[in-house]
Image (cartoon, rainbow, N blue to C red):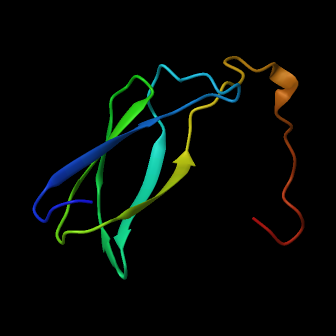
Amino acid sequence: MYSAGELSRFLIQSVNTRKHPKTIGGDSWRIRIRKGPASLAPVVFDLDNGLYEVLFLVLEPGAYTAEVYLDHTLCNGFRDPPKKFFRYGEYPEGIE
C-alpha cells in the first residue's frame, strides 16, 4: 500500500541467458504502474551495472500493480564477424 504524494521506487536486475546477473547497463525497459483505470508514468534510471531504478510518484493512496517489459537488451554476439558472415544480394525486380 502506498500513501498519496509518496515517491516510491523499485529495482530491476537484468540477467543474461544463463540467468546470471548482468554487470553492464544498456537495456531498455517499458513499465506501466496502474491502480484501476489510472496509470502512472515512472522514470527508469540505468545504473550501468545491470540494475535499473524505477521511480514514480503515487497520486492516490492504495495498492498498485506494475507491468514490466524488456524492450531491448544488449546481447553477446560477434565482435568481428568473418567477412563471409554477411551476404550481398540484389533487390528483387521492381524494388529500388
Query: In this rendering, would 78 be left or right of 51?
Result: right
Residue drawn at point x = 87 percent, y = 46 percent = 89
> Residue 5 location, x and y as percent?
10, 62
Query: In this rendering, would 7 be left or right of 80?
Result: left
Furthest-left residue in view? 5
Residue drawn at point x = 26 percent, y = 68 percent = 62
Using the image as rendered, state which of residue 72 and residue 62 is in the foreground. 62
> Residue 53 location, x and y as percent?
32, 39
What quarter of the picture does the N terminus occupy? bottom left
Residue drawn at point x = 54 percent, y = 51 percent = 71
In this rendering, the answer to whether 67 lies above or below 60 is: above
Residue drawn at point x = 33 percent, y = 29 percent = 47
Using the image as rendered, state which of residue 60 and residue 52 is in the foreground. 60
The quadrant in which residue 18 appears is top right
> Residue 58 location, x and y as percent?
19, 63
In this rendering, the answer to whether 84 lies above or below 33 is: above
In this rendering, the answer to whether 32 lies above or below 47 is: below
